[in-house]
Amino acid sequence: MLIDTGSNRTIIRSNVINIHDQRYGRIKKSSQKICTAVGHSADIVGILACKIQLGDWNLVFPAVISSNIIREGILGLDILTQYPQTSTNYDKKQF
């Protein structure tokens, strides 16, 4: 997962989750696109509550699901600001 303080939303690549697993609700479908930091277009499948594990934390959080981002996921400001106890050490590249 990439931590991106320039991304307002957390984005998960669709092939790393089971979009048919409805434990946390159904996917809210969308046909929108987003523009990536390098100017490419990414397709949005929808929004789904996903279980995200960060170290010892297990969060269920609504994430944007994309079919064609390069990384498995991007942690955006929505999670980083929701959990202020998180800290990032840029020098040591630690979260």
Image (spheres, rainbow, N blue to C red):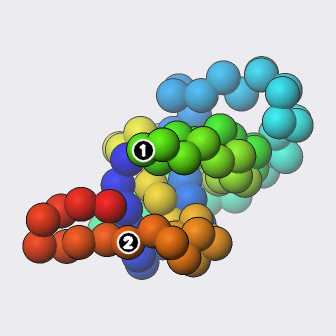
Q: Sequence-wise, which precedes: disc 1 or disc 2?
A: 1
Extreme left residue here? 91
Cα distance in 3D space between marks 1 and 2:
12 Å
Q: Residue at x 88, y 37 (%)?
A: 25
- Mark 1 neighbour class, 10 Å CA radius: few under 14, some 14 to 19, many 20 or more: few
Observer-nearest residue: 43 or 95? 95
Residue 43 visible (yes or no): no
Q: Residue at x 59, y 28 (%)?
A: 17
Q: Residue at x 60, y 42 (%)?
A: 58
- Position in image of residue 52 (x %, y %): 57, 42
Observer-nearest residue: 67 or 27? 27
- Position in image of residue 10 (x %, y %): 56, 59
In the rendered view, does 34 fall on the left or right side of 90? right
* Circle 1/circle 2 CB separation < 8 Å: no
Q: Give the amino acid at mark 1.
A: Gly
**So how many labels did they put on this image?**
2
Q: Give the amino acid at mark 2.
A: Ser
- Determine which of the numbered discs, if any, sits on residue 87 in the image: 2
In the rendered view, does 66 fall on the left or right side of 2? right
Residue at the disc numbered 1:
55
Position of residue 9 relative to residue 66, above or below, is below
Q: Secondary structure at mark 2?
A: loop
Position of residue 79 relative to residue 81, above or below, is above
- Position in image of residue 32 (x %, y %): 69, 58
Residue 89 visible (yes or no): yes
In the rendered view, does 5 fall on the left or right side of 66? left
In the rendered view, does 89 fall on the left or right side of 70? left
Q: Residue at x 54, y 46 (%)?
A: 57
Observer-nearest residue: 66 or 86? 86
